[in-house]
Each structure stands twice: as structure tokens, then as C-alpha cells.
Amino acid sequence: MDMMDIPQERKLITEVPGPKSRALFERRAAAIPLGVANLHPIVTARASGAIVEDVDGNRLIDLATGISVLNVGHTPPEVVAAAQRQLELDTHTCFHVTANEPYIELAERLNALVPIDGPVKTMFANSGAEAVENAVKIARKATGRSAVVAFDHAFHGRTLMGMSLTAKVMPYKQGMGPFAPEVYRLPFAYAYRWPGGPERCAEEALAYAVDEMHKHIGEDNIACVVLEPIQGEGGFIVPAPGFVEGIAEFCATNGIVFVADEIQSGMGRAGRWFAIEAEDVHPDIVTSAKSLGGGLPISAISGRADLMDAVHVGGLGGTYGGNPVAAAAALAVLDLIERDALLDRANVVGDTIMARLRALEERHPQIGEVRGRGAMCAMELVEDPDTKEPLVADTMNRIAGGALEGGVIVLTAGTYGNVIRLLPPLTIEELLLADGLDVLEEAVDAALG
Ligand SMILES: *Cc1c(COP(=O)(O)O)cnc(C)c1O
């Protein structure tokens, strides 16, 4: 066992949050602005595999993975070693000043992995939002057009363009406009809440989108459509079958760049390298981040070489983009996903979770829908299955808070905040996952009665 390994077991030695976390949160309140949200009042001391150990020594099962960042688990020795090695060799020269090999190698690796047709090139930035910004810059420059299409329930980051593309006003946008111009929003094929019913969802959503792009935006004005193949923050919404394919076809026919934002759904989370591989679609640009760096900040913009090369020299980049330490960590992450067959593991983990959520759904009519693909699974909760009125925040908090008190970290999501999403490491041991799901189940039973 590695020196820093933590036993992969849940263990509570104080109440959660414990006294040390509470004391640090007092300092946090005085030193750090309110707007930087904390979902759980816990301070991490260290983490390994699927366990987060807090400053009070409690060992919590992590079914959140820092919002989809630790698909390969916390601090896997191979990723730590790769980053450490690179730290000693070269931490930064800026790729624009003198290049580094990890950047070049990582670009080659991603070029071979992304489901884009033909020659591909990749550039790096630091965060998901920056990847989306760059995708839009490239699409606009390559097409000479300005309009950008995004969807209801979308999340694309917190920079000006990211925030403009993001759908939900509270908390992401309220009072922070004006937003970037030339952003247009269309309905997403959200089957559970489609007014015409789930069977008609894909067809109707697509027909509406096509009509809107044609009549109200004008296809010749659209630089790109930015779409999450499975929406993340929006509530793990798996688009109704056929919708994504139809949108991609419309893009291809009309010279519109189709951007798949795989920042949350990629890197094996949905049982494939990229979630969009489940559709019969080849995007023009793919954005990656989150689990790419295994905890180190790095994002990638991979695209058709002709699009990527449409930008003049100096039009793309940034001081830290493709930082060698983060790139070296990312290479180790890709190696681990391959070596440990984590795409298959994602499906096994997902099957376990879905079986448990479906059993819960049978007991509780307030579980309106259980959905997901691979290990990207969620349940949407409602007050009443007929009206689909979202479950009130108070009850949602009792579920997430109850799980935390029991030693399990889960996240909520969704436009209405009424989705419990599960993002365990793909490497999580079966028994630990079962234990985590037991605790969640108890919290759901207690909250829903
Ligand atoms: C998290 C996320 C982003 C933003 O990434 P940051 O690294 O937080 O800037 C963009 N798109 C999607 C789909 C995301 O889930």
C-alpha cells in the first residue's frame, strides 16, 4: 500500500461536520466571499481513491469527486508520480515562449481519442469555461459568423461567454449582466418534462430547434451550436434519442460548427471516452476539462484541423494553458483509464447504481425519474409525480445533508435543484459503493418518509 493511501472504508469519529471543520468554516466566513458557495461544510485534509478524509479524521465516501474531476479516483499513485516528476523537471516556461513535450504528447493522444472525423488538432487552457470560450472564438473565426446557439438547462462555465451560454439565472447570472450578445437559446430534448410527452420529445424539440435556427436566427449567421451530450449541472439530462443526431445533421448541412461540451460527461464518465459516442454523431469541436487532469487544472479544445488552423498565429493561447505539470498528470490519467479498462468499469458502476436507484424509485413516488448512462446517474425528485412539481429545497437538503451526516458526499443538480446526481470514481470498490448507496438510501427514506 502506498504511504499516502487511506483505507477504503467509511469511518465517522465525530459528528459531521466536526469541530475542526466548523472552526475552519468560521475563518472561511471572515476571509472568503459569500458568493463562492460551499455545498458541504467540510474541510478536506487528504483524499485517496473514493475516500475523502476531513480535518476531524472522518472518512467520507466521495460520490461527488470534486464535480466529476476524479474519474480515476483521488491521488492515484501513477498520477501523483507523473506530476511530481514533471514538477522537478519544469513547472512552467509558457508554451508560447518555449514549448514542452507533455503538451505536444497530450495533444496527440486526445487527437486520436476524440470522435471527430478527419485530421484533428488540440490546444489547451486551464478551465472548462476557458475551453468553451476558445471553442466559440475558433468557430466564429473559422465561419466568419457570430451567432452561438445553446440550450435550456445548459451549463458552460462562469466567464462572460460561459455565463451567457449557461441557462440558469440563479445563481449563475443574476445581476451580473449584460451578457455576451448573439447567444440564442433553444429547448433541450428533456423527455421527462417535455410538454408533449417523452415519446414525442426528440421529434418536437428538433423540429422547433430547426425552425428557430432557420426563421429567427438564420442558419447563415450561426457560427456554432454548443451542446452537452448529457447535460451535467442541468440535472444529468440524457437527450431523447435522435435529438442530438438531428441537431448535428442540421449543423453539417448548414456549415455550422457543432461543439460537444464533454467537460462533465467525458473521460469515461458515461461509459465511453466521450458521451457523444453513444449517438451517431461526429462533432466538429470537443471540449474536455474536469477529469482530464485528475485534479490538476487543465482543459482541452480538440477540433477539426481546418477549423483549429483558421485562427491566425497568436490568436489563441494563454500564460498557463497546457501547463507541463497538468499535462503530465493528464497523460497519466489517460494511461490509467486504458490500463484499468475504466470505460467498462463505468458501465459496471452505473449498473449497480441504476439498480439501486430503480429499487428506491419503486418505494417512493416522489422519485419522478431515474436516468443516466454509464456512471453518470441521477434521480429527479418531485412533490407529486402527476404535476412533476419539483421537490422543495428543504427536502432536497435533508437528503444531501442526511447522506453527509452518514459519511457520504453527494451532489444535487438541475434547473429546479431537485436532482441527486452520483459521480463516484470509476475505480470505486463494489463494497464501498454499496455502503455509500446504503447511506444514501437511508437518507432518502428518512427525508421522503
Ligand atoms: C464544469 C463545466 C464547465 C465549466 O468548467 P470550469 O472548469 O468550472 O470552468 C463547462 N461545461 C460543462 C459541461 C461543465 O460541466
Image: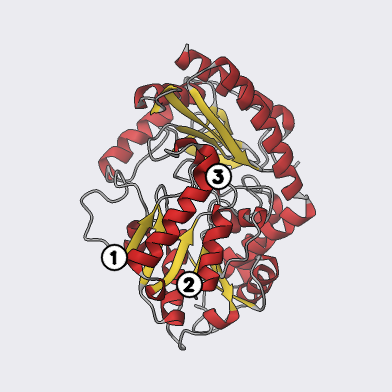
Closer-to-camera residue (347/31): 347
The residue drawn where x is 51% and y is 19% is 444
Which of the numbered marks, if any, corresponds to residue 256?
2
Dot 3 alpha-carbon crowd within 10 angstroms: few under 14, some 14 to 19, many 20 or more: many
Of mark 1 and mark 3, the one earlier in the sequence is: 1
Residue at label 1?
180
Q: Do the residues labelled 2 and 3 touch (CB within 8 Å)?
A: no
User: Dot 2, how many residues are within 10 Å of its Cα: few (below 14), some (14-19), or many (20+)?
Assistant: many
Q: Which residue is drawn at 35% across and 42% down?
A: 37
User: Residue drawn 51% across and 40% down?
Assistant: 191
Q: In which quarter of the image is the N terminus?
A: top right
Instruction: From the top left corner, tell me how far across and down residue 188 is, in percent.
Output: 45, 49
Earlier residue among tags 2 and 3: 3
Q: Nearer the viewer, mark 2 or mark 3?
A: 2
Q: Which amino acid does label 3 sit on?
A: Val
Marks 2 and 1 close (CB-CB < 8 Å):
no
Number of callouts in the render? 3
Between circles 2 and 1, the one closer to the viewer is 2
Seen from the viewer's position, the closer of residues 367 and 202 is 202
